[in-house]
Image (tube, rainbow, N blue to C red):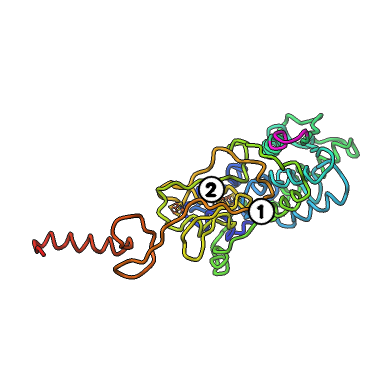
């Protein structure tokens, strides 16, 4: 079970201006940003699970684990309790969207058994943070919530060996994260320890970089929202309290440079054939922040609140319209911002020519 990066889905590969650090923050011991791309040792596996659940674009995964399959198998099993298992060896693989979708799909509250985690582990901290976010979202519209089962939560960082055939907790421990970590330790000993994975962009990846894709976890959320009436009414939540979606505003300093809507990984931002506007569909936004990172003039900003009443309702909002005109000089279309009818390139050329004439002392 190894950590894998689909580099074409990573926003850092889409643009060097991306400042995304979600994976490195979720798993700081195992992932670092090297030459602008998330980098980890070749044998990194389950210990970096929290980074998988944190990546907004599903660029990271663990080999052999298909989270969307797990989601549907869990619902089929008619269980209401998440516990580490062979199919889901660490609960931190699940994103906020997965957890929210699970609780929405169940009639009763979702329960999460975290008894097999060390109290101080980064995985547990991430799980608690995500559960807290889901509960805040649910708390704004209903009495539903995720309940934690943590009666025997460990406060030691090292696994404690118990007698064979012990309690249910021992069983969970061996089956889940700690069991997998032990296995992995043995595996690591047979490998070169410090070899870093290489995430070079192959020609296929370069073509894929331009593609927009909606992560599976967002599709799952769409599908459960269709059958949920919890978010019928307007309910504002502060933007900083929701990690996976956002609302946007574009101000008049926008130059229509096209960067944000050309690079947006999910298609949440788009334009028309004439590039005469910027449209936005909040339900597609992954809050990857790439649009903010690439905007030189800081014209695109996040709304201070997100309206939960928008959940599941796809509609495009026009954030800004541009006046597209033909340049008097070259005839190309450009975004007119007043003054002479010249595109930026012709304007620069005209200014350069004027400056040369001035220096040479020629007066026309
Ligand atoms: S969290 Fe995902 S998108 Fe962001 S840098 Fe890491 S791999 Fe790339
Ligand atoms: S919002 Fe910023 S990045 Fe987007 S088109 Fe306008 S100036 Fe360019
Ligand atoms: S709108 Fe911005 S934050 Fe949302 S997915 Fe697109 S680039 Fe990322």
Q: CA distance from mark 2 to mark 1?
A: 24 Å
Quarter of the image with the C terminus is bottom left
- The numbered mark at residue 289 is 2
Q: Secondary structure at mark 1?
A: strand
Q: Residues within 10 Å of mark 2 (few under 14, many from 20)?
A: some
Q: Which range of residues does the magenta coloring cover?
A: 137-143
- Is tag 2's residue or tag 1's residue first in the polypeptide sequence? 1
In the image, is 275 to the left or to the right of 337?
right
Work out whether residue 322 can be spotted.
yes
Q: Is residue 360 magenta?
A: no
- In front of the other: label 2 or label 1? 2
The residue drawn where x is 75% and y is 46% is: 101
- The numbered mark at residue 59 is none
Quarter of the image with the N terminus is bottom right
| Label 2 CB less than 8 angstroms from ligand 3 | yes
- The numbered mark at residue 3 is 1
Quadrant of res 344 = bottom left
Quadrant of res 331 = bottom left
Residue 206 in the image: above or below residue 153: below
Where does residue 174 sit, x and y in percent of width and height?
82, 42
How many numbered marks, from 0 up?
2
Residue 328 in the image: above or below residue 140: below
């Amino acid at each position: 079970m190894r950590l894998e990066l689909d580099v074409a889905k990573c926003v850092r590969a889409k643009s060097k201006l991306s400042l995304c650090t979600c994976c490195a923050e979720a798993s700081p011991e195992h992932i670092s940003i090297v030459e602008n791309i998330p980098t980890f040792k070749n044998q990194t596996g389950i210990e970096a699970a929290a980074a998988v659940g944190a990546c907004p674009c599903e660029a990271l995964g663990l080999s052999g684990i298909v989270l969307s399959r797990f989601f549907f198998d869990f619902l089929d099993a008619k269980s209401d309790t998440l516990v580490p298992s062979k199919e889901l060896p660490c609960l931190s693989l699940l994103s906020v969207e997965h957890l929210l979708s699970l609780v929405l799909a169940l009639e009763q509250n979702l329960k999460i058994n975290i008894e097999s985690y060390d109290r101080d582990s980064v995985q547990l901290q991430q799980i608690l943070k995500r559960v807290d976010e889901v509960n805040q979202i649910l708390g704004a519209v209903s009495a539903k919530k995720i309940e934690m089962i943590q009666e025997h939560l460990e406060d030691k960082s090292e696994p404690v060996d118990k007698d064979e055939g012990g309690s249910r907790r021992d069983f969970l421990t061996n089956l889940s994260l700690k069991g997998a970590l032990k296995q992995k330790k043995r595996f690591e000993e047979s490998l070169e320890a410090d070899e870093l994975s290489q995430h070079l962009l192959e020609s296929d990846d370069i073509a894929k970089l331009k593609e927009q894709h909606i992560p599976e976890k967002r599709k799952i959320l769409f599908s459960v929202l269709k059958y949920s009436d919890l978010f019928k009414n307007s309910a504002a939540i502060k933007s900083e309290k929701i990690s996976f979606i956002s609302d946007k505003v574009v101000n008049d300093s926008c130059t229509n440079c096209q960067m944000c809507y050309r690079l947006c990984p999910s298609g949440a931002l788009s334009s028309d054939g004439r590039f005469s506007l910027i449209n936005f569909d909040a339900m597609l936004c992954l809050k990857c922040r790439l649009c903010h990172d690439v905007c030189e003039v800081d014209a695109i900003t996040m709304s201070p609140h997100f309206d939960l009443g928008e959940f599941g309702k796809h509609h495009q909002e026009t954030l800004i319209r541009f006046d597209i005109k033909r340049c008097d000089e070259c005839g190309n279309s450009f975004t007119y911002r007043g003054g002479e009818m010249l595109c930026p390139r012709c304007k620069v050329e005209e200014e350069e020519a004027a400056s040369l004439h001035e220096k040479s002392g020629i007066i026309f």
